[in-house]
């Protein structure tokens, strides 16, 4: 006669929860990366005790930054400019977008680099600079076209 394999049935009498927890649990044996010197600064009990003694909340160690931000647009205009740039990028052919990993920022970085100008002209991203054929004339002289 064949032995039938009976499934294990867990009961409170045949299952040791602590043993299984030790076998399958997570053991963090690495040294802690927490910096204990900030313990008082982050302990709410310490902060409340200091507030009770001094009447002041802890001050910020980072001071605000001031600068000339006159060229900065408002949020709405900035978001619209980003969306317009993304729309224009998406109008490029798929092969061109793939060359820049479908990332408009990479295209902008490419165009910002003056060394890439020739390649940008070949790709049709930048118009070729027209060669000026006009001749400069000193002040007071008459150009041949103006002379009659």
Image (cartoon, rainbow, N blue to C red):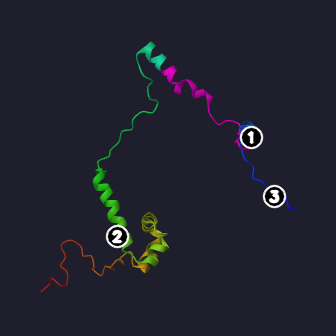
Task: Write down the residue under mark 3.
Answer: 4
The residue located at (71%, 40%) in the rendering is 21
* Mark earlier in primary sequence (1, 3): 3
Please tell me the numbered disc located at residue 15: 1
Marks 2 and 1 sit apart, C-alpha to C-alpha, by: 65 Å
Apparent side of residue 73 relative to residue 34 in the rendered image (left or right): left
Task: Find the magenta span and give its range.
Answer: 21-47
Tell me the mark number nearer the camera, choosing from 1 and 3: 3
Q: How many marks?
A: 3
The residue located at (48%, 16%) in the rendering is 49
| Residue 74 showing in the rendered view | yes
The residue located at (42%, 33%) in the rendering is 63
Tell me the mark number nearer the camera, choosing from 3 and 2: 3
Mark 1 packing: few (<14 Cα in 10 Å), some, or many (20+)?
A: few
* Mark earlier in primary sequence (2, 1): 1
Task: Write down the residue under mark 2.
Answer: 88
**Is residue 25 or residue 140 the one in the foreground?**
25
Q: Quadrant of residue 82?
A: bottom left
Q: Position of residue 19 (x, y in %)?
A: 76, 38
The image quadrant where one finds the N terminus is bottom right
Q: Position of residue 66 (x, y in %)?
A: 36, 39
Q: Are marks 1 and 3 in contact (CB under 8 Å)?
A: no
**Is residue 32 or residue 129 the one in the foreground?**
32
């Amino acid at each position: 006669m064949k032995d039938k394999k009976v499934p294990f049935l867990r009961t409170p009498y045949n299952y040791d929860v602590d043993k299984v927890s030790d076998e399958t649990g997570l053991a963090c044996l690495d040294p802690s990366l927490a910096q204990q010197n900030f313990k008082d600064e982050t302990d709410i009990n310490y902060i409340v005790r200091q507030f009770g003694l001094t009447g002041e909340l802890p001050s910020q160690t980072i001071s605000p930054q001031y600068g000339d931000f006159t060229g900065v647009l408002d949020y709405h205009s900035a978001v619209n400019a980003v969306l317009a740039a993304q729309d224009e990028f998406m109008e490029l052919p798929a092969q061109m977008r793939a060359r820049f990993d479908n990332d408009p920022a990479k295209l902008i970085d490419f165009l910002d680099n003056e060394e890439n100008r020739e390649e940008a002209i070949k790709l049709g991203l930048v118009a070729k600079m027209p060669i000026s054929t006009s001749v400069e004339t000193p002040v007071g002289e008459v150009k041949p076209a103006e002379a009659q």
